[in-house]
Image (cartoon, rainbow, N blue to C red):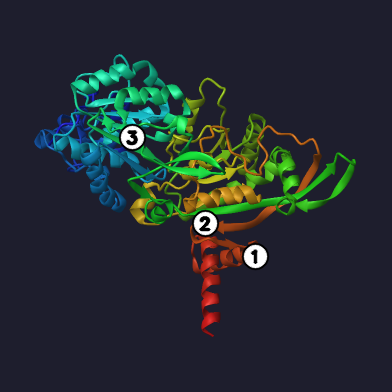
């Protein structure tokens, strides 16, 4: 078996051993014999073959079983089983790299881009075309995530390289952030001249965020437009195609020239694209959008006159824009919105028979709202359910990871913290109490609820991804665009708010007096492009209860009932 580096950690620590013994019930997981104090923490993939010293690659075995296995692998690397899109994309991307040195892959979050990069590494490494790998990511959280995922695939990279670019002995490359490149670009370039390297740029559109990052990438690699690639291979990966101002062109990406509203732009080109819709139902959960509305009472400050109460969705555009941020901060709204989110999560938990510790993500517009939402979630559940993660607190990232890993259901309440670099398949429900509609932000939020848990993969029982939003047409359309794959990024770095008020905006024209009658207004089954009324949903819920179908699928059942009725009506 080829070596792609070794885990520097050879032996299980005491905490890992205790976990393994408890998980095994005190019996050898190979032969069933009772374990004594001399039991072994056996590597399923041998350490000498790159097997990681992690719980996912360890089992508690008796000494006889482990010594009898010797320097062999107990199991194949399950994570390297090709998904259909990966099997189709791999020869195309590899051929592009063989011929031109670079390739660009577009795949939605959760599609399996990390595994694809590992497959490409093995292919190029085994063919003798590369000797090492450099992965560049947008954040330190993603450094940890990539290191962990690749270690499970017996590929070991250095997350803390010497001089920002040089891996320790026994490792096959490095993982670094885009922020580090301007300082260490020349060291990277020198190292790449010594050993043929595969460069992987994760979420490559970030290279355009800072001119210094783009200059560093050009220094390291060269420019594909000039036919100059100074690396063994380059793989650009992104969740979406994007547009750039010509002055912010990424040197490893191919473009075509387009004109947008009379302004020249560069549109990124892909060598393989994996549409979100293609993965829904197989690799990703199908998203259901629950629209929550209420009647707003407000004053027209220009005349100091009260305005008759209106449903949020029925407000005129200028009224919605002015009032939405005030609605999202209203205590009445937050309390009812949080309670509805808990109800949706409980339906998900029941559907899996409590086999997973499913979690709720509550996206708040401000810290003040987040704190109120945490209290509202605790009130709705009658327990210490909420985990408040505030970005300006020193332990925010640690608290976020703790909430992700704890063995119980909970509600994670954040303000803009859960985007790239946070992988928690147990998040099945999102309460989106925000008016941000920037495509990348919305795509990242939606992706957090679309990953499948191990239970869903093993049983084939896939939950829908439930996303609760304010009943606002602009927010509704922003989420619908994601499933359609019709949201190319612009070169704007600030959140794009198309018709919805920025989170800090306060109206100079209207003042919210109060909001009453908050309730569910309808559901959009996004992948089927169908909308379900609350009446249809209630009827479908009753049918679910009669025929013993989990009520979490009621919206989809309602669509089926309607389409079946239309089909019979047309045939009649």
What residue is rendered at 38% in x and 30% in y? 137
Residue 67: image quadrant is top left
User: What quarter of the picture does the C terminus occupy?
Assistant: bottom right
The residue that disc 1 covers is 535
> Residue 527 location, x and y as percent?
48, 57
> Residue 157 location, x and y as percent?
27, 27
Pick the front one: 42 or 277 = 277
Residue at mark 2 to residue at mark 1: CA–CA distance: 19 Å
What residue is rendered at 61% in x and 47% in y? 475
Extreme-top residue of the structure = 163
> Residue 551 location, x and y as percent?
53, 60
Sequence order check: which comes first, mark 3 or mark 1? 3
User: What quarter of the picture does the N terminus occupy?
Assistant: top left
The crowding category of the residue bearing disc 2, from other C-alpha atoms within 10 Å (few below 14, some 14 to 19, many at least 20), is: some
Q: Secondary structure at mark 1?
A: helix
Q: Is residue 364 left or right of residue 427?
A: right
The residue that disc 2 covers is 526
**Looking at the picture, does residue 449 appear above or below residue 402?**
below
The crowding category of the residue bearing disc 1, from other C-alpha atoms within 10 Å (few below 14, some 14 to 19, many at least 20), is: few
The residue that disc 3 covers is 225
What residue is rendered at 69% in x and 40% in y? 328
Sequence order check: which comes first, mark 2 or mark 1? 2
> Mark 2 or mark 1: which is in front?
2
Pick the front one: 257 or 358 = 257
**Looking at the picture, does residue 7 appear above or below residue 162?**
below
Pick the front one: 363 or 349 = 363
Residue at mark 3 to residue at mark 1: CA–CA distance: 57 Å
* Total numbered labels placed on residues in the image: 3
Sequence order check: which comes first, mark 3 or mark 2? 3
**Looking at the picture, does residue 174 appear above or below residue 491?**
above
Q: Is residue 472 left or right of residue 149?
A: right
Q: Is any atom of residue 246 visible in this view? A: yes
């Amino acid at each position: 078996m080829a070596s792609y580096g070794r885990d520097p950690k050879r032996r299980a620590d005491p905490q890992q051993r205790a976990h393994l013994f408890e998980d095994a019930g005190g019996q050898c997981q190979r032969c069933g014999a009772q374990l004594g104090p001399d039991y072994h923490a056996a590597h399923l993939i041998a350490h000498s073959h790159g097997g990681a010293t992690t719980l996912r690659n360890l089992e508690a075995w008796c000494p006889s079983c482990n010594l009898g296995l010797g320097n062999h692998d107990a199991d194949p690397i399950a994570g390297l089983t090709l998904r259909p899109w990966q099997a189709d994309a791999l020869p195309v991307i590899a051929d592009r790299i063989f011929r031109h040195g670079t390739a660009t892959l577009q795949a939605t979050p959760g599609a399996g881009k990390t595994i694809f990069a590992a497959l490409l590494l093995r292919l190029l490494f085994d063919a003798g075309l590369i000797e090492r790998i450099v992965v560049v990511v947008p954040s330190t959280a993603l450094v940890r995530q990539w290191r962990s995922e690749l270690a499970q695939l017996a590929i070991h990279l250095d997350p803390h390289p010497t001089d920002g670019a040089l891996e320790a002995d026994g490792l096959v490359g490095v993982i670094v952030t885009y922020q580090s490149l301007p300082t260490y670009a020349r060291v990277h370039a020198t190292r790449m001249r010594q050993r043929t390297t595969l460069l992987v740029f994760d979420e490559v559109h970030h290279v355009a965020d800072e001119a210094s990052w783009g200059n560093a990438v050009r220094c390291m690699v060269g420019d594909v437009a000039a036919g100059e690639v100074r690396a063994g291979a380059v793989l650009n990966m992104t969740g979406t195609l994007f547009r750039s101002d010509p002055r912010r062109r990424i040197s490893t990406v191919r473009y075509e020239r387009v004109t947008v509203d009379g302004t020249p732009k560069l549109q990124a080109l892909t060598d393989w694209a994996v549409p979100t819709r293609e993965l829904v139902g197989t690799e990703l959960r199908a998203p259901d959008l629950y629209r929550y509305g209420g009647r707003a009472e407000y004053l027209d400050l220009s005349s100091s006159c009260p305005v008759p109460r209106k449903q949020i969705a029925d407000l005129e555009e200028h009224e919605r824009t002015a009032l939405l941020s005030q609605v999202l901060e209203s205590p009445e709204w937050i309390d009812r919105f949080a309670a509805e989110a808990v109800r949706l999560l409980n339906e998900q938990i029941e559907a899996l028979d409590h086999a997973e510790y499913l979690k709720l993500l509550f996206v708040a517009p401000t810290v003040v709202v987040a704190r109120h939402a945490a209290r509202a979630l605790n009130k709705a559940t009658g327990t210490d359910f909420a985990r408040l993660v505030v970005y300006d607190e020193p332990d925010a990232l640690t608290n976020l990871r703790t909430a992700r890993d704890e063995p119980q259901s909970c509600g994670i309440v954040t303000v803009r913290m859960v985007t790239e670099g946070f992988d928690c398949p147990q998040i099945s429900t999102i309460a989106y109490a925000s008016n941000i509609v920037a495509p990348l932000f919305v795509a990242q939020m939606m992706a957090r609820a679309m990953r499948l848990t191990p239970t869903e993969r093993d049983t084939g029982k896939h939950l829908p991804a439930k996303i609760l939003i304010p009943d606002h047409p602009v927010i509704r359309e922003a989420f619908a665009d994601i499933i359609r794959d019709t949201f190319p990024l612009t070169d704007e770095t600030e959140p794009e708010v198309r018709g919805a008020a920025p989170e800090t905006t306060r109206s100079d024209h209207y003042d919210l007096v109060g909001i009453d009658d908050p309730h569910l207004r309808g559901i959009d089954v996004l992948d089927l492009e169908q909308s379900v009324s609350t009446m249809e949903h209630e009827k479908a819920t009753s049918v679910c209860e009669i025929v013993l179908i989990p009520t979490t699928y009621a919206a989809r059942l309602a669509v089926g009932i309607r389409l079946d009725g239309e089909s019979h009506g047309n045939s009649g």
